[in-house]
Amino acid sequence: MTITSSAPAIGGGDITTPHIGAIAFAGTIGTIVEWYDFLIYGTAAALVFNSQFFPNVDPRIGTLAALGAFAVGFLARPIGGAIFGHFGDRLGRKSMLMLTMVCMGLSTAAIGLLPNYAQIGIAAPILLVLLRVVQGIALGGEWGGASLMVLEHAPAHRRGLYGSLVQVGFPIGLVSASAMFSLVTMLLSDADFKSWGWRIPFLLSVLLVAIGLFVRARLPETPVFERMKARGDVVPAPFFEMILKQPYNFLIATGLKLSEVSWVYMLTIFVVVYATTKLGLPKSLMLNAIVLAALLELITIPLFGHLADVYGRRFLYFAGVIFTILFAFPLFWLLDLKTPEMVILTIVIALNLGHGLMFAPESAYFPELFGPNVRYSGASLGFQVSAAIGGGFAPIIATALAAYTGGTAGVSIMLILLALVTLTATLFARETKNEALLD
């Protein structure tokens, strides 16, 4: 049966629906699929893409090339935010939410079917990069659509909590991607995995996307967008409307995201490389620590979302950014002890407090900063521009700093500087928890 909403009710400028639980579930499950698709590429890039698509170069160069293609996905995300944001503000949230999932699913499955370098030569890595670009564009539009679908149905006093459920898709996608590759490598020989087994997680995406599409097809358009359309408030060029009339909010959203996204990709990329190469720690220890930390976020992210409803979005941001400033140096001091228990505890604390505190309220906070007719564009672009900077460049800069200085002091200073940008944005941001989504 299709999920339907009752006639929109205006309460203090807010529109709510009685089916928010089902809608939140649909938004979350789709986000899980999207993050799974996006993140399995990173694992494959580290394990097999150097030999499959860049075999005629030094293995280290091949790995760098594969990870470079991984970074391309981050650079494509703002493009997706701009494209899908424009049409999401013009045509509706639901249609773009369905389209992003189709784009992600088809591009991910295509990677699983892609001939390697030995079969089609230089066309193989070129197609790989192009498919990664499509993945990035799809994810760039997915987050904004999922956030608005849930937020614009949610009751005003629970927007932080329900919005945080969209954010749960990231840790579940991270755990699912890691678990799928662990299962495949456990069941297959190393030769079979490198030959064809690595394709299985990509091809399984088709099934996951089909489930996601089935669930999301049952959703109604958000009552906020329907009322906005009925009032004739849809603007012809939402992206330019947002940039020209709300540049302050766009800069605030970009600044708010910067520290959190840099922190999480430092933990999941740079710290893993540092701990395994410089400290000689087992890769399995680091990956298990990240998985455990991500599992705990299934609890802490909704908890922090609830706290954002009680104490406000800025309260969570102040807490998270101050933690990252204070923990930037101890993070590496504790890892340098090299005891498994301390390594796991450090990663768990760093991910949940340095990432979770700020990540949890974003699905509510970023859209709330913008008016309804540019909300998809503004929230998506602010989120994705910072993701491109923090996810695409911060780990690379950190690697260069560590190599140049021979230590991690420069990396810690970089994390503090990024946190100061977010702290400044938080100081200048307004609190939105009591604001209506539709005037």
Image: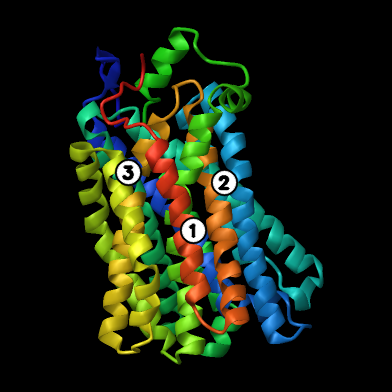
- Seen from the viewer's position, the closer of residues 63 and 424 is 424
Kindly identify the amino acid type of the residue bearing the numbered disc 2. Val
- Which residue is located at x 27 percent, y 43 percent? 315
Q: Nearer the viewer, mark 1 or mark 3?
A: 1
Of the residues under marks 2 and 1, which one precedes in the sequence? 2
* Residue 385 disc label: 2
Of the residues under marks 3 and 2, which one precedes in the sequence? 3
- Seen from the viewer's position, the closer of residues 226 and 344 is 344
- Seen from the viewer's position, the closer of residues 235 and 20 is 235
- Which residue is located at x 54 percent, y 46 percent? 384
Q: Position of residue 374 (x, y in %)?
A: 51, 25
Q: Relative to 322, say whether 53 is above or below.
A: below
- Which residue is located at x 41 percent, y 33 percent? 367
SS for dot 3: loop
Q: Where is residue 49 in the image (x, y as percent from the top left)?
A: 64, 75
| Mark 3 and mark 2: Cα distance apart in space | 18 Å
- Seen from the viewer's position, the closer of residues 255 and 108 is 255
Q: Dot 2 surroundings within 10 Å: few (below 14), some, or many (20 or more)?
A: many
Mark 1, residue position: 417
Q: Which of marks 2 and 1 is in front?
A: 1
SS for dot 2: helix
Mark 3, residue position: 361
SS for dot 1: helix
- Which residue is located at x 70 percent, y 61 percent? 129
